[in-house]
Structure formats: structure tokens, C-alpha cells
Image: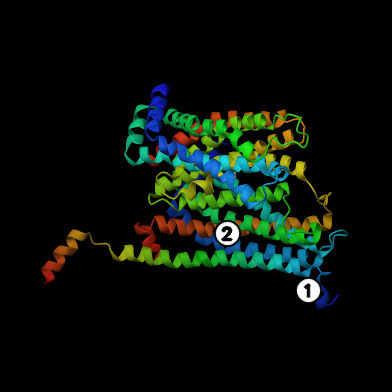
Amino acid sequence: MFATLLKRELMLARRNWVGILIPLFFFVMVVSLFPFAVSPEAEFLQQIAAGVVWVAALLSVLLSLDMFYRSDYQDGSLEQLLIMASPTQVALSKVTAHWLVTGLPLVLMSPVLAGLMHLNYSPDANVATSHTAVMMLSLLLGTPTMCLLGAIGMSLSLAASRNGMLVAVMILPLYVPILIFGSAVITASLTNSGYNAQLAILGAILLFALVLTPFAAGRALKVAVS
Amino acid sequence: MNWQEFFNMGNHGLYVWWSYGVTFVAIILLLLAFSWYKKKLLAKVKSHAKDKTPKARKVVTEQITE
Amino acid sequence: MANASKSFGRWFHQLGSPKWFYQKSAKWLPWLWIATAVLLAFGLYYSLFASPVDYQQGNSVRIMYIHVPAAALSMVGYLAMAICAVIGMVWKMKMSFMAMRAIAPVGALFTFICLFTGSLWGIPTWGTWWEWDARMTSELVLLFLYLGFIALHSSFNDRSKADNAAAILALVGAINIPIIYGSVKWWNTLHQAYSVTKKGAIAPEMQTPLFIMIAGFYLLFAIMVIIRLRLEIMNREAKSKWLQEVIS
């Protein structure tokens, strides 16, 4: 059943491929604004790269939520889905599709942004650094959690209003821990100190969220259509 | 200790009095907001109380009096 | 024993009835106001006059007597909201959802008071009105959670949907608060630039007024929640006959 649901979500996403590219464009654009706003110097950009990339990823996940839930809710197919399968399954399939379609591309695209932000800069040109790979790892563990928490917020606000700000106001406070540990991983890598612990905590938060949030999101979906 | 000293609080008076003052004002403001809301709700309850006759009957009685 | 649990059951049952609560709470409120006034009068007298000056912080320590109670209630309030959410979701008690909605603005107010007084306390003690201290930052996130809850609850047209959705949010927030606090604390120890004055064991002359103030604030919180809850009952039972009779 889960596979069927997931297939359906992915097929809908493929039909709306322009809508899927928009969060990615947004991700690149937000990050590329920072050199204009602060300074194009490599050393300086490297210092803020972790935070900028993480915040940009967070916002584009948040902004892409709408298309996975809104149209299903409005045309009534969400109701049909909830009759067909358990709410947890529906929520999980939506989260998975959302992550595959926006989260994963964000992770794959992030090296380009790391380049824009000179994340791999080192004063000694002969020394190769692995900061970009570490950043990808942190995003790989962080973006699914963002999708999971975002699913709760989006499902809760479905029947409430079309205002996208509402989701942001509800969910952004909950994003604080992943933001802290996600950018801490990169900062630790930059200062050449160990980052395994921070990565482990990111993974732990992901597992914890994976266990609990589908239930909450499923319940929220049920409330929305009730 | 005189009053001047008491209000000054060893140059910390500004912080202490602002803290207590804003706390007091904030609590009063919320209570005022509640009482304002209460007025609105009273009107709502009263309008429901007046409007007891079902609509269909109202139309009929109006027609009869005409 | 069986008798005790029976009477508790009855009390719980009565508490679930908006009519019973609306009529009884009108009788409680004056007494609660008197108790609060006495406690706060004593508490304010102690905290502003009769308590000693801290040898390090001087008179600014007097801010503690409202800051600490407000901080305690901001967290207790959120916990109470989450408990109401669970009771409402499991037993479908409408009073529980009403109480949840009633706690939110009061809790947000006390969180604001905690943040504001904390900032003012910070100026003489830390030299800055905002410090990314673990407790202060968590308190700020808590305020955001309260505001998110109120924003969500008030953006529905359908009341039962609003209750159920907001209850889920309150629960998710309550589970997250320890995680947020833990992560902010860890983050803060990593970045700590100032050494915040260590608060050791509190002197007994300060403890007594602090306890009195905490008790007073608890009662004040309860009063404000009861007032808001009565309004919520008025709003939801506007069409019921008993309320119209009580009011007119």
C-alpha cells in the first residue's frame, strides 16, 4: 500500500516538474544573494557558509511543502486517500515523496552552493579540504527531519488558511535543534575538530522524528478532512 | 533610608522599576483585553437570547399581523 | 478508598461540565482575588523593601522576584496546555479544549514578562540586554510556540477542527521543548563568550519572598486562566439556554 501511495505522489510530482524546480532555484538564489549583501571575500564567506546554506535549505523545504498537500486537500483526493489507507501511511508517503523530490536534490545541489560560498577555501592552496562532503552529510541527515516536521505543520494548517506564513510560524521554532546541530557539524569541520558527535545527534533526531511525526501528521491530516 | 534612595536603588532603580512596571501594565492590559472581549460576548449571548423564535414561525406571525 | 475515588470521579465529571464550572467559578473568583492580593502585597513588600541586597548584583536582584515566578509559570503553563490537549483528544472533553485555549494567552503573557524582566536584569548584571544564554533563548522559542499555537487556533472557522489541530501542535511542542532546551544549552556552552554570574545556593532571606511571589503568581495565573475560560464558555455556549438565563 505504501508503495502505491508513494508511486502516486511521485507521479503527481513528475507532472508538476516546474513546481519542483522552483524550490531548487530558490535555494540557489537565496544563497547567491549573501555575497552581495555581505562581502565576496572567500575567508569571510567561508565563515558564514554553514549557516547560510542551512537556513536556505530550511526555507526551501518549508516553501515546497504546499504543493504536496494543498491540491490533494482541495480536490478531495486526500479524503479518498485516507479512506484507502491509514493516515500514518498517507503522511509517510507524502513525506517520503517530498524528501525525494526536494530534500534529496537540495543535498545533491549543495556542493555548487558550497563552491559559491567558498566553503572549501583554505589559505594553503595545496591542502585539500573535505568540508563540502561533511556539509552534504549533515544535510542528508537534516533534510528528512525538516520534511517530517514540516508535514505536521502543513497538515495542521490545511483546513485553517492559505497563508503560508502560518506554517512557518508554527514550525520554525521546532527547527531550532536541527539548525543548531546541522551548522555545528560544518563549523566543527572548519575548525578541524571532530564532528561525529554532532552528526550522530542529527541522526538520532531524525530517527526520533521518524518514529513519532508520521502519527502526528497523519492525525493532523484526519483532522483537516474531518 | 529615605524615599529618594528607595527609588534610586543604588542606580539600579531604572531596571527594577521598569521590570515591575511593565509586568503590572502587561497584566492589566491582558485583563482589559479580556473585559473588552467579554462585552462583545455579552452582546452575542443576548442577541441569541432574543432570537428564540424559529425563522419559519416568525414569517408566519408577521404575515398574520399584516 | 473506593469512596474517595468515587468522589474524585464525580468532581472530574463536574469539571467537564461548562455550566457547572461557569456557575461555581463565579463564586471562587472573589476568594482567589483576595488570596492573590494578600500574597502579592506581602511578596511585593518583601521583594521591594524587606529583602537584602545581593552583594554582587546590588538592588537589581529584586527583579528576580518577578522574573523567576514568570519563568516557572511560562513552562508550567505550556505543560498544562499539553495535558489539556491529551485529555481533550483522548476523552473528547470539550472543557479540556476550552481550558487549553484559555491557558495560551496567559502563558504567552508570562513568557513575555519573563523575557522582558530577564533582559532588564541583564543590563546591569551582564552588560547587555540580550544574551544568547540557553535559558533565555529557550524562553524565546517558548514564546514563539505559544504564538504559533494561538495563530493556528484562531485561523480556523470550524471550532472542533481548531481544537484538534491546536492540540496536536501543543503536544508536538511539548515533546520538543526538552530537545530544544538541550540543543540550545549545548550550543550555548560552545559559544559562550561571557561568563554568566553563577547563582549559588539562594540565601534564606531571599527564598521566603521568592516563594511568596511564586505562590502569588500561580494564583494570578489561575485567576486569569479562569477568567479567560469563562469567556471561552460564553463564546461556545452562547446559544444554550442556561447561559442566557445566568446572564440576563
Seen from this angle, which residue lies furthest front? A125
Q: Quadrant of residue A128?
A: top right
> Is residue C106 found left or right of C119 in the rendered image?
left
Q: Position of residue A106 (x, y in %)?
A: 54, 34
- Label 2 neighbour load within 10 Å: few <14, some 14-19, many 20+: many
Report the quarter where the N terminus of chain B lies: bottom right
Rendered residue at 63%/36% (across/down): A114
| Residue C115 in view (yes/no) | yes
What amino acid is labelled 2 in the image? Ile
Rendered residue at 83%/74% (across/down): B5
Q: Position of residue C22 (x, y in %)?
A: 46, 57
Rendered residue at 65%/64% (across/down): B23
Q: Position of residue A173 (x, y in %)?
A: 59, 45
Color theme of the render: rainbow
Reading the image, the residue beneath label 1 is B7
Reading the image, the residue beneath label 2 is C223
> Is residue C48 found left or right of A110 in the rendered image?
right
